[in-house]
Image (cartoon, grey):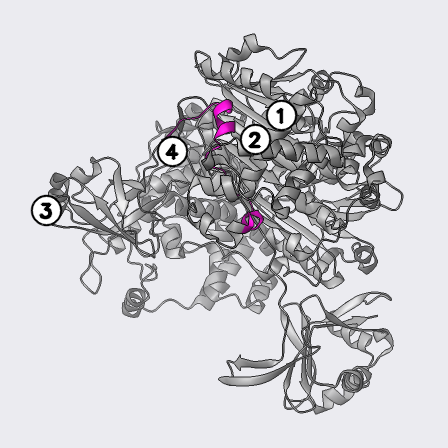
């Protein structure tokens, strides 16, 4: 079998870097040995195939017995009108192959190949009759090596997945989270027979453990016996996650009690999980544990916590008997039976008789089920209508549901092939019936004739009716971003028929171009698109999917700088905005624009297997910016520069030194060479300190440790004019970074040092470093020198020789060339070295000798540099080298990874391979196609709801993690926007409660006071307008100019009387244009950023934003 091949498959890291960040190298190798059969290539089958092919398996076989129809074009993105009548698998196999040339994609037609089941690692069946599915499942279970079996279907707004991984399956990693490690501050042992160790971690690095996790110990003084004890169970984890107990044998406890001294590392040991799967036949009878996606959809007995529900709450029976998942399990079983009785035909759209028949079948199946699997309250209207609605749309495959379940099932295939992440165990059901319009859909709108006339949109007509689809076709939508999310959105829009009539249009903007690493998940792009505009290439690709799509590609970034492009007329013309962005700053700006212009915003984001979606609705919900994630924790600079204790801190310094050496320094040299003393004066004017200016000019000798820095390094001390000099510079940098600096640190703080409290200075989290002696036979040493020399050569304009990547040639230069000599270094006392202990640092600085006059040093250095510039070669200009992580030929990651690992070696920290260094230093965001597809499917469901104008109670935000059991999908109602009410508020400056009046009462962030005709107003007339029309007394008005506030009017600040008189007579537009240096065009809006009002009685007033319409 292909999956059992032992050969190591080569992984293209440039292409697969974002996916490898999620799965890891070992799982990617397993995927590359997996062979997958997908049977039933309808819209859902196409989605599954796309995601599995992009996952980079070895081979995918597409199988189908059916031929394409016009309705298939509404959910299958690779079928066109010319494919109608052709076998669906054979019609799309070529385009599926183009998704990933590294995957073998083939097509099969005719009957399902039962005799070939053993050839595959995973088999996925879609649209397969129950009897056939049972046979395939049995063949998979009885194969010599059991084959993973997945059955999935979507019917209208409902979907189902069944997963059987065989009688015994091992889940190697049930969460996918990074392995957690912390530094031990202290360990104490109890006197119990079964000894408990009380472990305390250092304050700044708690270990996020939970009870019943397992850990192991390493390093530390006096921990040999504990280190060898293996995985140990954790209990009594403290609330702050900094303390916990570990149960150990008595002998280990005694050893710790008598020999443990200090330090150590504790590391999570994630244990494999054994799973036993039942057959499809057994699952249908007793589904077991089912995940509940939306608990608000459970039965009335559950939502009211009735006694009968409380009796089973917390057990698998709760969701089966009282949940929506159990109800849908019954619905899909009933649909199988209906199809069997009707020769494979599903209930026609809107056919009430067929729906009633399906419900009767469900009632009979339910009555014959065991009590533990019997659906309760089936005849309650809120429950029975689900079966009826399910029947009405059962014949349709809708693009959003196909995207959602294509993502979920694609991830289950990966889990089956790798053991990475927890699989579905064993069923999953979900519905989006809350997308249906509130009013009953007229029968004529989804009659057989209407469905046939709708062609590719027949599936949506079957579910929503013709009027709804017509509104989709007239939609004006703005898509911001056309990367991974954007590609999936555009595909969804094209299939849904959005903007396919004259009034409609999809505008998509992205200022980025396509890179090779995009191809593993941004599925609209191919190799020949690399370097081209993302938005333009994406639009061209989706218009091939649906030529009726009216889409316009823009290449402008949505930002304050492009408000001339995305002006008020543009925003006011939109019906809806969909974000497909990958950074918070851009999301916040688009969110602000949507709030300002009162436009619905559909927001989403992904991170590996995790994703979230958010609905932002005018006057109903809070906005995206109302809640934010806490900022990422940054390591203290003293830890990065002197006392690192993990590889991340080593790589932070490595990246910083790369930027400093090869981007910042040459940039500053160019500034000095072109401006001289004027550049220094500009630094003073920008409030740069003298020490910072000196650092730019010559570097800090105390930090450089034997080398010069800044402009002095490039222009005088190390002006490299030959390859040998570049190699010498890199060799001396090695000595400075990894030997001299450590010698200097140990000179200041010897191993026996103590603090003023008598505590050993080198206590956790500090790690005692050791200098590295250069060794030309060490590959890591040579990697640093090679990368440094090539980067220096680029900067200095030196042409490297053909042997620039030859270790032996570089080693020979190091041995023979005078340009590569290293000067011995003698440490000196450095009182300025920071330890992170303010008291200790201040004490040492106070005892140090006074520093030299920095201004004199600056003047002397400027004169020296100017003299050196006069003798530099004509035309010499150092070149900047901006960090680019995805080009393996530019030496950037070679320098950073070798620097980080050498730094780690200094401190006995575990080193990482170059790829892991790239992920960390390059801040690569983990991304996979499965999560992206699923997230966009959920957003498109909310688009349906917005078009149907459904109430807030029907809208849903999503948080999901496909790595967890379930999979973990949680839907929740969006938070309503806060209404501002009059009352008292706490004034921190006055230290008391003050009265505050809301005007108008109950306004929200979506409201604004728009001043019409402001282009003809003076400031005085504006003040009078507020008083006469709104009863508001303006007390102060300020404008924001850059990051400063400029007061235009103030009735409270002293000395403003004359300026007030002058400005009240001036035109508003003239004041704003003069102060801000902008031009206000007719028809534009201008928000007054800071304005303070009082009532006529002197109470503070809280108003919405005040906007001038020019």
| Res. 724 visible in picture | no
Specify start and end residues of the magenta stretch as a single range: 274-300
Residues under labels 4 and 3: Cα distance? 41 Å
Residue 361 painted magenta: no
Q: Earlier in the sequence, mark 3 or mark 1?
A: 3
**How crowded is the residue under tag 1: few (<14 C-alpha within 10 Å), some, or many (20+)?**
some
Contact between marks 2 and 1 (CB within 8 A): the answer is: yes
Relative height, residue 863 to residue 577 (above, below): below
Element at label 4? helix
Q: Residue 258 has which mark?
A: 3
Q: Nearer the viewer, residue 775 or 823?
A: 775
Residues under labels 2 and 1: Cα distance? 9 Å
Element at label 3? helix
The residue indicated by pointer 2 is 365
Q: Earlier in the sequence, mark 2 or mark 1?
A: 1
Element at label 2? helix
Element at label 1? helix
Residues under labels 2 and 3: Cα distance? 67 Å
Question: Splitting the image into 4 quarters, where does residue 996 fall?
Answer: bottom right
The residue indicated by pointer 1 is 337
Q: Nearer the viewer, residue 249 or 273?
A: 273
**How crowded is the residue under tag 3: few (<14 C-alpha within 10 Å), some, or many (20+)?**
few
Residues under labels 1 and 4: Cα distance? 69 Å
Residues under labels 3 and 1: Cα distance? 70 Å
Residues under labels 4 and 2: Cα distance? 71 Å
Residue 29 place in picture, x, y as percent: 47, 23
Residue at 82% across, 40% down: 443
């Amino acid at each position: 079998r292909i999956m059992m091949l032992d050969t190591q498959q080569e992984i293209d890291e440039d292409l697969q870097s974002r996916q490898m960040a999620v799965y890891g190298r070992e799982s990617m190798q397993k995927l590359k040995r997996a062979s997958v059969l997908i049977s039933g290539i309808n819209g859902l089958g196409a989605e599954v195939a796309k995601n599995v092919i992009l996952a980079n398996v070895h081979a995918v076989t597409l199988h189908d017995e059916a031929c394409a129809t016009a309705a298939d074009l509404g959910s299958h993105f690779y079928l066109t009108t010319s494919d109608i009548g052709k076998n669906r698998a054979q019609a799309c196999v070529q385009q599926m192959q183009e998704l990933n040339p590294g995957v073998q994609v083939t097509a099969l037609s005719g009957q399902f190949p039962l005799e070939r089941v053993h050839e595959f690692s995973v088999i996925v069946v879609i649209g397969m009759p129950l009897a056939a599915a049972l046979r395939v499942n049995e063949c998979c279970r009885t194969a010599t090596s059991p084959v993973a079996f997945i059955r999935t279907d979507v019917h209208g707004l409902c979907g189902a997945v069944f997963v059987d991984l065989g009688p015994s399956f091992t889940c190697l990693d049930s969460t996918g989270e990074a392995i957690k490690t912390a530094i031990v501050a202290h360990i104490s042992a109890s006197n119990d027979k079964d000894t408990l160790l009380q472990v305390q971690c250092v304050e700044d690095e708690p270990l996020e453990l939970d009870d019943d996790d397992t850990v192991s110990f390493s390093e530390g003084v006096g921990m040999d016996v504990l280190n060898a004890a293996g995985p140990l169970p954790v209990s009594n984890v403290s609330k702050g996650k900094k303390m916990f107990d570990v149960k150990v044998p008595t002998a280990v406890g005694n050893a710790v009690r008598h020999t443990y001294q200090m330090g150590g590392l504790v590391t999570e040991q994630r244990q494999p999980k054994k799973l036993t799967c039942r057959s499809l036949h057994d699952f249908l009878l007793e589904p077991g544990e089912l995940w509940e996606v939306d608990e608000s959809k459970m039965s009335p007995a559950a939502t009211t916590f009735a006694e009968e529900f409380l009796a089973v709450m917390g057990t698998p029976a709760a969701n089966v008997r009282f949940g929506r998942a159990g109800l849908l399990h019954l619905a899909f079983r009933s649909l199988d039976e209906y199809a069997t009785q009707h020769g494979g035909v599903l209930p026609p759209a809107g056919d009430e008789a067929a729906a009633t028949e399906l419900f009767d079948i469900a009632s009979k199946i339910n009555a014959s089920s065991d009590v533990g699997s019997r659906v309760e309250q089936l005849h309650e209207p809120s429950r029975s209508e689900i079966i009826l609605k399910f029947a009405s749309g059962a014949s349709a495959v809708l693009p959003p549901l196909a995207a959602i379940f294509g993502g979920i099932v694609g991830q289950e295939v990966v889990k089956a092939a790798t053991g990475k992440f927890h699989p579905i165990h064993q069923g999953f059901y979900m519905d989006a019936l809350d997308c249906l319009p509130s009013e009953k859909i007229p029968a004529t709108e989804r009659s057989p004739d209407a469905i046939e006339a709708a062609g590719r949109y027949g599936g949506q007509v079957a579910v929503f009716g013709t009027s709804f689809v017509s509104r989709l076709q007239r939609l004006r939508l703005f898509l911001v971003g056309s990367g991974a999310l954007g590609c999936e959105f555009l595909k969804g829009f094209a299939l849904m028929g959005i903007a396919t009539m004259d009034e409609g249009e999809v505008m998509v903007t992205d200022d980025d171009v396509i890179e090779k690493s995009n191809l593993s998940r941004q599925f609209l792009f191919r190799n020949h698109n690399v370097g081209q505009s993302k938005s333009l290439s994406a639009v061209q690709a989706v218009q091939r999917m649906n030529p009726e799509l009216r889409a316009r590609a823009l290449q402008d970034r949505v930002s304050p700088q492009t408000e001339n492009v995305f002006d008020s007329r543009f925003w006011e013309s939109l019906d809806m905005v969909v974000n497909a962005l990958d950074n918070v700053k851009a999301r916040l700006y688009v969110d602000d624009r949507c709030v300002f212009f009162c436009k619905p915003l559909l927001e989403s984001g992904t991170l590996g297997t995790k994703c979230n979606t958010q609905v932002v609705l005018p006057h109903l919900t809070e906005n995206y910016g109302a809640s934010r994630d806490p900022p990422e924790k940054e390591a203290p600079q003293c830890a990065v520069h002197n006392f690192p204790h993990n590889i991340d801190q080593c790589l932070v310094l490595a990246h910083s030194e790369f930027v400093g050496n090869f981007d910042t320094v040459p940039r500053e040299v160019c500034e000095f060479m072109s401006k001289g003393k004027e550049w220094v004066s500009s630094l003073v004017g920008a409030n740069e300190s003298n020490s910072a200016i000196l650092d730019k000019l010559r570097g800090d000798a105390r930090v450089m440790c034997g080398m010069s820095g800044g402009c002095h390094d490039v222009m005088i001390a190390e002006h490299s004019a030959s390859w040998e000099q570049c190699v010498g510079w890199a060799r001396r940098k090695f000595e400075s970074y990894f030997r001299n600096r450590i010698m200097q640190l140990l000179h200041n703080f010897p191993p026996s040092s103590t603090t003023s409290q008598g505590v050993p200075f080198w206590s956790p989290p500090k790690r005692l470093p050791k200098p590295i002696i250069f060794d030309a036979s060490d590959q890591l040493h040579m990697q640093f020198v090679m990368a440094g020399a090539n980067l220096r050569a680029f900067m200095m304009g030196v042409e490297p020789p053909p042997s620039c990547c030859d270790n032996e040639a570089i080693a020979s230069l190091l041995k023979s060339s005078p340009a590569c000599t290293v000067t011995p270094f003698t440490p000196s006392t450095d009182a300025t070295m920071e330890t992170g202990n303010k008291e200790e640092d201040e004490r040492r600085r106070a005892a140090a000798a006074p520093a030299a006059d920095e201004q004199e040093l600056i003047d002397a250095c400027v004169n020296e540099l100017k003299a050196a510039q006069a003798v530099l070669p004509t035309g010499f200009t150092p070149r900047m080298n901006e960090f680019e992580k995805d080009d393996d030929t530019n030496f950037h990651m070679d320098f950073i990874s070798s620097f980080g690992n050498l730094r780690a070696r200094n401190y006995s920290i575990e080193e990482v391979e170059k790829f892991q260094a790239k992920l960390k230093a390059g801040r690569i965001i983990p991304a996979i196609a499965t999560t992206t597809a699923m997230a966009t499917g959920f957003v498109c469901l909310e688009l349906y709801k917005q078009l149907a104008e459904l109430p807030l109670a029907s809208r849903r935000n999503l948080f999901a993690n496909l790595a967890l059991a379930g999979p973990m999908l949680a839907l929740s109602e969006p938070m309503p926007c806060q209404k501002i009410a009059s009352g008292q508020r706490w004034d921190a400056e006055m230290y008391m409660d003050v009265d505050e009046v809301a005007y108008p009462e109950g306004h929200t962030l979506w409201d604004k006071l728009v001043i019409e005709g402001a282009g003809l107003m003076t400031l005085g007339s504006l003040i009078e307008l507020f008083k006469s029309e709104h009863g508001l007394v303006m007390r102060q008005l300020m404008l924001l100019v850059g990051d400063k506030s400029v007061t235009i009017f103030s009735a409270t600040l002293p000395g403003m009387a004359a300026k007030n008189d002058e400005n009240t007579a001036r035109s508003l537009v003239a004041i704003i244009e003069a102060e801000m240096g902008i031009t206000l065009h007719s028809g534009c809006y201008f928000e007054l950023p800071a304005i303070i009002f009082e009532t006529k009685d002197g109470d503070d007033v809280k108003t919405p934003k005040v906007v001038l319409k020019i």
